[in-house]
Image (cartoon, grey):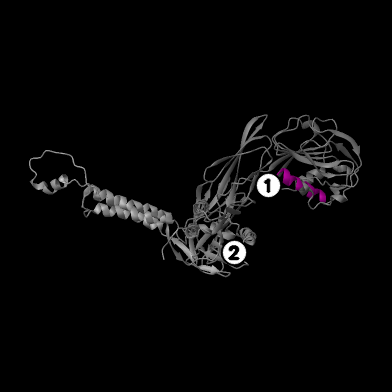
Amino acid sequence: MLNFLNPWGFLFSLFIPAIILLYLLKQQYQEVKVSSTYLWQKTIQDIQTSMPWQKLRKNLLLFLQLLAVLLFTLAIARPFLYRKAENSSDFIIVLDCSASMQAEDVKPTRFLRARNEIEKFIDGLFPDQRVTLIAAGYEPDVVARRTGDKNTLKGRLKRIEVTNGGGSMDETLSLVQAIARELEDVEIHVYTDKNYEFGRPNYKSIVFNENGDNFAVDLVSWTQTPDGPVILSRIANYSGENATLSVECLADGITADVKEIMVPADGTTDVYWTGIPSHTRWVEIDILDKDDLLLDNRGWAITDYHEDNRVLLVSQRNIFLEKAVTLRKDIELIKTTYEQADDTEGYSLYIFDGYIPESLPDDGNIIIFNPQNDNNFLNVGEEFVPGNIHLSSQTRYSQFLDFVAYDDFHIARARQISVPDWGNVVLEAEQGPLLITGEKGSQRIAVFSFDVHDSDIPLKMDFPILMQNMLTWMLPQGLGHDVKYYAGQEVQIQSMPGVQNIYVTTPSGERLSIDPTYSIVPINDAREVGIYRVQQDVVSSKGTNTTEHYFAVHVPTQSESDLRPGQVLTDTSQYESGQYTPVVQMKELWRYFAWILLAVILLEWWVYQYGY
């Protein structure tokens, strides 16, 4: 049975008698002299009558105009039919936005098909039904909360974009549980390409998956040899058949080699690449064959992180510090004495043992041991004998003492130090601080208030651990080739001391300006996969120098590349993991009447112009 959402729309039908009335009114004639009226007898009779009306004649234009008014009336009255639907007043709809939803085994893609199906569902809502719409992207995002406004729902639905990451379905379903507990009568629909278990009734997964075949670059790594970099790549076959693939290796974007390999069904093949130029900054491995998910057909490795960090140690021959610092393989240690330490620059880290220069360098981070009171940097007081050594309750840098038994330290003497504005006490005794750390602008500084020779710390295994913890903060290995970032993860860049500008260029070429105020700069927009370039403009006494580094953002292939996980339902069939009660839902028809109306108007115009 046909029903109407807007019965007031039938008032527009009052135009029907108005149009008929216009056709009944006698036309006005203008007097024109002609040579004969023989053929105009009927017209003369009309002119001679005194009545204002004329007989209604058959007229195609009249019929088309009446039909147009009727169709317009039906359209604005919003007719609808009942069909089977869900017996709930509230719905929670979850749209999976993970990278695997970009697969093209469901046309045009799994994501676009799911979004279209949600839009159809929204069109069929009753006026008293409400929808909460959640996007399961990099993190759960409630894009619409308990609304029945179809235009609002569809507008926000279209703004949801698929991601290049692993999604957040577990966190999203936890959020759904919390929201559902607040609603009495709720139906939960999850539009995804996997089946998710959910421990409550009135839940169903609408699965978009046709068991697509996929190949992926699972791993790209490298090692330095005397003949140059050697690249290892691992190619995975997420299909049930053996595959012969063409794989390309690019060095800094230029083709270095192409190989044809065989990858077994549901297996992997390791491919080695040699002959890579030694100055190469990054390599890319591409699978050239087409599959159902192109996103993971590329992988990258950064190869420009082979330069050592230059560290300057200013001391009077401190063997303990030398040994502890050089345990890290990427450090080049340069040693000098107090007399030769003035006007030094060009180092990533400066370690001053028992000495502070008149002017501290501004182009590297700084560690100070046993500062003397004749300096322009710290306010150093009298000596004291430390007792009850403990971690400060106010510290923000407790990671320096990870795996360090600091309560077993014995220190013969230390110096009182006034904590500067930038400082934060990490380790302290009852009488005063023993370790102060902090950030002064983009420069990281640590101060030990004692001489390591006046303690038993260098004799313990804790000392090299303490120093490595400190070096991890001072010289983070950060964006090197051992770090793998996935789309959506936060990437932290260490700003260099003296940095004035930081720019990040994304794989698509967009240039981002980053605030260089702090020593650690987070990048939250690393959502494209590919190579990112980081440029830092560093100002020193010698002028401005621009450094350039790279990092790569990858697809999480372990969770996203296998397009056939678990029990997969095809052809968008519905999987019920709870009770599902079909009742009725409305199907609006006004769009169909609107299209017919447009066709009638075009036909009426054609008849008016060309006749019939």
Q: What type is the residue that disc 1 sits on?
A: Gln
Residue 112, image x and y in percent? 48, 57
Q: Residue at x 36, y 54 (%)?
A: 13
Question: 117 or 209: nearer the eye?
Answer: 117
Asked if the stretch drawn in magenta spans residue 7, the answer is no
Q: Residue at x 84, y 36 (%)?
A: 418
Is 605 above or below relative to 121?
A: above
Q: Residue at x 66, y 29 (%)?
A: 542
Q: Is residue 275 visible?
A: no
For label 1, count other residues whose C-alpha is less than 10 Å away and answer few (under 14), some (14-19) or many (20+): some
Mark with earlier residue (1, 2): 2
Question: 33 or 512: nearer the eye?
Answer: 33
Q: Name the residue carrying label 1.
A: 477
The magenta stretch is 462-477
- Helix, strand or loop at mark 1: loop
Residue 230, image x and y in percent? 59, 52
